Amino acid sequence: MSRILRRCHSTLGFVFDIDGVLLKGQNAIPQARETLTTLQTKKVPFILLTNGGGVLESARCDFISQKLQLAQPLLTRQLVQSHTPLRTLSSKHRRVLVVGGPGDRARGVAQEYGFQEVLRPIDLIKANPSIWPFHKYTTHEVDEWGLDPELSRVAVGGTNEPIDSILVFNDPRDMGSDIQIVLDLLNSENGLLGTRRTKSTSVPAVPIIFSNNDLLWATDFKLPRFGQGAFKIMVQALYQQTNNGSPLQSLTLGKPYKVCYDYAHHVLIDYRNSLLSGDFNRPPYMPQLNSSPAKTPFDKVFMVGDNPESDILGGNNYHWDTILVRTGVYKDGDFEQDSKLARPTFGTFDNVRDGVFAALEKYA
Ligand SMILES: [Mg+2]
């Protein structure tokens, strides 16, 4: 233990964004491998913190480890996706509607988090296609992904059970049906589909949690595309419209919000404990939402990101040090164009290796 302690720079920690820092689209950013391998060798604690999601944490870790050709693969306990903190709700919310993500993969994620009954909008379409006549699912997809109504118990007018909450795991893939079904539930009698409550209030019939607030994201297309934040604006606007102007109460996770950094901070401390003890098999610590660690063992934590508006803003607000890289969203000149953009406390670097090595040189 003492030898490990001596070799471990345990008072420094790093938190990495993924897209634009370690990966660009599906491909590795060249300097990422050397960076993470160096931290692994020096036993410097680090985790990944992304506003992405829609897939299992283990699947994303495998994907990144393989793309970066890491000799020592990343561990699931080192990754916080935007929806990872939702796992803490699985003991309170039994029957949930999970929205967004590729294919039907978010259902598996929610089940892995421990939610007992996981419904998807496609289950409701399977039970009653007229709930949104213009849906874009193929017959094959409805057959393959949709739960049978006897299992989902969402038969409007027939056997039906209330839904406890709406969890938006990732960007919707069929925006029209998702919007209709989400609004139906927010305006229902206590989460019972096919009902419409009479009162107008800011408190929806069931709580809704958005896993991130990203209005735009970068794709292969030449201009940024709408993300989950755009979906949230639509839900909010329609809710207000259908509730006599009352704004929707909701919770949003992800960067730059404190709720996300609190969760990540716990995960980083937990990973450090594993590094120090050498025990990576014990179950990971499960922090509660909105709880800050009572104390931190770190002198410095660096948030490394490519997006001033999420990574850097959130990191600065959380009083971490921040490193901005030029391999993603941020472009030189952005600060001159927008003086309100959050600036990194430690500096702007060409890539993740230059930023991390400069921090190690100064503090390790
Ligand atoms: Mg990014």
Image (cartoon, grey):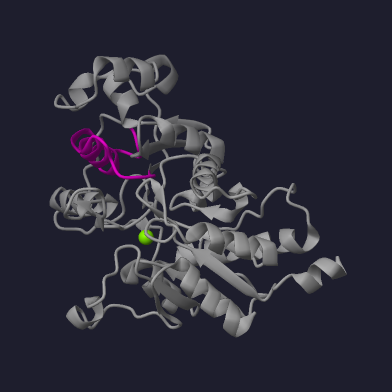
Q: Quadrant of the C terminus?
A: bottom right
Q: Is residue 234 visible?
A: yes
Q: Nearer the viewer, residue 274 or 328?
A: 328
Q: Residue at x 56, y 74 (%)?
A: 301
Q: Residue at x 54, y 42 (%)?
A: 62
Q: Position of residue 1 (x, y in %)?
A: 86, 65
Q: Nearer the viewer, residue 311 or 172?
A: 311
Q: Which residues are magenta?
A: 168-192
31 relative to 126, above or below: below
Q: Residue at x 35, y 80 (%)?
A: 343
Q: Position of residue 314 (x, y in %)?
A: 41, 71
Quadrant of the picture in which ligand 1 is shown: bottom left
Q: Position of residue 356 (x, y in %)?
A: 52, 72
Q: Nearer the viewer, residue 240 or 340?
A: 340
Q: Is residue 232 left or right of residue 351?
A: left
172 relative to 277, above or below: above
